[in-house]
Image (cartoon, helix red, strand yellow):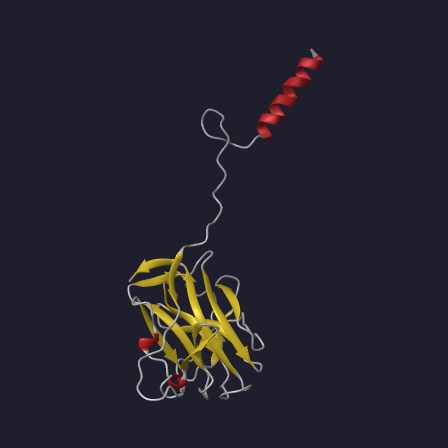
Amino acid sequence: AGVALGLALVSAGASAQAPAGRAGGAPAAAAPAAARPALMFKEEWKQPPYTGQLNDENRRVTQDAVTNPRLELKLYGAQAKEIGVYNHEDRFDLWTGMATSPVAILLRDKANFADLTGLARLRAIVRTQSLHTVYPIVKLADGTLIAGNRGFSTDGEYISVEVPFSGLKWFKVDPVKVTTTVEVKNPDFSKVDEVGFVDLAPSGGHGNAGWANISHVELYAKAVPR
């Protein structure tokens, strides 16, 4: 009788500790692992039309440099018009070298906001020189520009970088001066209007002066119709 009672108590304890399952005793299915969103858009740039010699003035970036018809180019900064289109390593990039003010380069999907929550990612090939650093920047649905604190400095090498939007600190950016101000706590990334990169330092021209290049931009995010 003592043995039988002991077995009954062990059985009852095991039942009490077993995970709850569906009707019939089947175990509950594990929650699916979070998946990265698909590619929302990609931009590789092209040389805008020009006449005469292909000099710094004729290299100035315009909307005609955008290859993806779904996208609009958005530039910020007093000297943003000086950003140029160049070809390096058999691909086009945007070069900030002639801009003597901080500048930001962003892209806007004409038909959709971007949902940057979860595992959304921004990828690009970037190059910086002489202590210049580029940071991710987005324009929220309410019009606020904010920059994240994960910077990329490459010492003159082209490097593929990937930006997560969670886990960073974000700071408000003046759209004219392109300078940072207060931290923005818990920004709403569910509907983002524009996304790109910012160089917070004036550039110094050709050669080994400070500047940045941005090429092959890819955004992996969920599209939210406007």
Q: Where is residue 218 in the image (x, y as percent from the top left)?
A: 42, 64
Return the residue found at the far right: 2
Q: Position of residue 80 (x, y in %)?
A: 40, 83
Return the residue found at the far top: 1
Where 73 sits versus 29, above or below? below
Where 50 sits versus 70, above or below? below
Where 39 sits versus 34, above or below? below
- State the residue in front, 10 or 24: 24
Q: Residue at x 50, y 87 (%)?
A: 206
- State the residue in front, 154 or 224: 154
Q: Where is residue 6 in the image (x, y as percent from the top left)?
A: 68, 18
Residue 175 figure quarter: bottom left
Which quadrant: the N terminus? top right
Q: Where is residue 59 in the image (x, y as percent from the top left)?
A: 38, 83
Q: Is residue 53 left or right of residue 152?
A: left
Q: Residue at x 36, y 80 (%)?
A: 61
- State the residue in front, 81 or 4: 81
- State the residue in front, 50 or 5: 50
Q: Can residue 104 be seen in this view?
A: yes
Q: Residue at x 43, y 75 (%)?
A: 93
Q: Is residue 131 left or right of residue 174?
A: right
Which quadrant: the C terminus? bottom left
